[in-house]
C-alpha cells in the first residue's frame, strides 16, 4: 500500500480526542491562573458552590446532583453505586470506556449489536432481565455521532422496568442541532429511573480539569457520592465550572457550539464529496465506517501529521478541529484516495 506524503512542516493536528478546538474563555483562564496561588488548600469536598450553580441552572434540588471527575469518572461511580445486580446493558459500538468501567465495578458486560450507526433500542430493551443493574445510552453516541430521538427513547423507556436505572450519557449534548433529540433533563423529570451524565470537558473546554456532573434520583445520590474520591473535583475545576455556568459567558459558549456545528456540516460535506461514507453526526466528531481500511487510514494520517482514532476493522472517528486542521485533513484524504487507499 502506498504511503501518503507528509503535508508540509505543520505541527501534528490532533483530531483523535474529541476536544474543543477553542482555547479557554479569557475569564475562565484568569480564574484558573488566580487560583494557582492557593494550591496549598484542599478543595471544598462537597463542591457546594458548583452544586448550587447546577441546581439553579437545571431547576432541580441540590440533593439530585453529584459532581466528579468528568462524565466518564461519574459513570463508573454511578454504575458501582447501582449494584448489586450483575449485568450492564449497552450498545456494542459505543464509548470505549464503558467495558472498562463495567469490568472495574465487577459487573458483567452485555453489549447489544448496533442498528447501523445507532443504538438498537428494541434489542437493548429485550436484553434487560432481572439481572440487569442498569442500561447505558450514549446520546449522541461516541464514536458514531448518531443521536436517538425523543419518540424512540420514550418508547424504549416504556419497556424498561421502573427499578432498572437508565443512564443517559450526554457528554456531547451542547453540539446537538436536531430538535427531535430530547434534552436528558426532560427524560429525567418524566421518568423516575433516568439518570443524566454531563461534562465540562467538551463544549466548555475544561478537559484538563476533569469535572462533570450527574443528575440522579435523590434516593441514589448518597450511594453515588460514597463511591467517589474525596476532594474531587479540585478547586480550580470547581471554580472554572461555576464560572462557565455564569449567564455572562453563555452567549460566547453558545456561539462556539454553533460555529462548531457549522464546521461539522462543512467537513461532512467535503469528505462525502471526496467519495467517503460519513455517518450523520450530532456530536463534535464524525465517523467514517472504513472497515478493514481503518487502521491503514489512521497510520497514513499519522504519517501526514494528523492524529485520528481508529477502531481496527470497524471505522475511524475524527474530531472536528479548527478550519486549518479540517482543511489539512481533507487535503490528506484527497491525496490518500488518489494514491489508492
Image: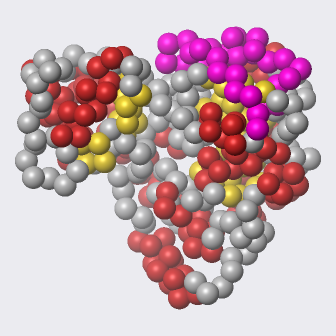
Q: Quadrant of the N terminus?
A: top left
Q: Is residue 234 above or below residue 120?
A: below
Q: Position of residue 301 (x, y in %)?
A: 22, 36
Q: Is residue 209 visible to us here? A: yes
Colour basis: secondary structure
Q: Position of residue 243 (x, y in %)?
A: 57, 69
Q: Is residue 115 magenta?
A: yes
Q: Quadrant of the C terminus?
A: top left
Q: Residue at x 56, y 55 (%)?
A: 200
In terms of depth relative to the viewer, which is nearer, 33 or 95?
95
In terms of depth relative to the viewer, which is nearer, 54 or 36?
36
In terms of depth relative to the viewer, which is nearer, 24 or 38?
38
In terms of depth relative to the viewer, which is nearer, 101 or 338?
101
Q: Is residue 267 visible to us here? A: no
Q: Is residue 45 left or right of residue 212?
A: right
Q: Is residue 198 magenta?
A: no
Q: Is residue 5 above or below residue 151?
A: below
Q: Which residues are magenta?
A: 106-134
Q: Is residue 269 left or right of residue 164?
A: left
Q: Position of residue 164 (x, y in %)?
A: 85, 28
Q: Residue at x 16, y 40 (%)?
A: 304
Q: Quadrant of residue 277?
A: top left
Q: Is residue 22 left or right of residue 226?
A: left
Q: Is residue 315 above or below residue 62?
A: above
Q: Is residue 244 above or below residue 142?
A: below
Q: Position of residue 43 (x, y in %)?
A: 68, 76
Q: Residue at x 10, y 41 (%)?
A: 6
Amino acid at each position: 500500500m502506498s504511503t501518503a506524503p507528509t503535508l508540509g512542516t505543520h505541527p501534528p493536528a490532533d483530531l483523535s480526542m474529541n476536544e474543543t478546538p477553542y482555547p479557554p474563555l479569557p475569564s475562565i483562564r484568569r480564574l484558573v491562573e488566580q487560583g494557582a496561588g492557593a494550591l496549598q488548600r484542599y478543595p471544598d469536598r462537597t463542591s457546594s458552590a458548583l452544586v448550587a450553580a447546577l441546581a439553579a441552572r437545571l431547576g432541580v434540588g441540590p440533593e439530585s446532583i453529584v459532581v466528579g471527575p468528568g462524565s466518564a469518572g461519574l459513570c463508573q461511580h454511578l454504575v458501582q453505586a447501582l449494584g448489586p445486580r450483575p449485568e450492564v446493558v449497552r450498545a456494542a459500538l459505543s464509548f470505549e470506556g464503558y467495558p472498562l468501567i463495567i469490568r472495574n465495578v465487577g459487573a458483567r458486560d452485555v453489549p447489544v449489536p448496533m442498528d447501523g450507526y445507532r443504538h438498537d433500542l428494541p434489542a437493548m430493551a429485550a436484553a434487560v432481565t432481572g439481572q440487569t443493574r442498569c442500561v447505558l445510552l450514549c446520546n449522541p453516541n461516541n464514536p458514531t455521532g448518531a443521536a436517538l430521538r425523543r419518540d424512540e427513547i420514550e418508547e424504549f423507556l416504556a419497556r424498561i422496568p421502573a427499578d432498572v436505572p437508565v443512564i443517559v450519557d450526554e457528554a456531547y449534548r451542547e453540539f446537538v442541532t436536531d430538535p427531535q433529540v430530547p434534552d436528558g433533563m426532560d427524560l429525567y423529570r418524566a421518568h423516575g429511573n433516568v439518570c443524566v451524565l454531563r461534562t465540562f470537558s467538551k463544549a466548555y473546554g475544561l478537559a484538563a480539569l476533569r469535572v462533570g456532573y450527574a443528575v440522579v434520583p435523590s434516593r441514589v445520590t448518597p450511594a453515588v457520592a460514597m463511591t467517589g474520591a474525596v476532594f474531587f473535583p479540585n478547586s480550580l475545576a470547581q471554580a472554572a465550572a461555576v464560572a462557565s455556568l455564569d449567564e455572562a459567558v453563555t452567549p460566547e459558549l453558545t456561539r462556539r457550539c454553533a460555529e462548531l456545528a457549522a464546521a461539522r456540516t462543512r467537513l461532512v460535506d467535503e469528505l462525502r464529496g471526496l467519495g467517503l461514507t460519513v455517518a450523520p453526526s450530532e456530536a463534535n466528531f464524525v465517523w467514517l465506517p472504513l472497515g478493514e481500511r481503518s487502521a491503514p487510514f489512521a497510520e497514513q494520517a499519522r504519517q501526514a501529521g494528523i492524529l485520528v482514532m481508529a477502531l481496527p476493522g470497524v471505522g475511524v472517528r475524527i474530531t472536528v478541529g479548527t478550519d486549518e486542521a479540517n482543511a489539512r485533513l481533507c487535503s490528506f484524504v484527497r491525496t490518500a484516495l488518489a494514491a489508492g487507499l
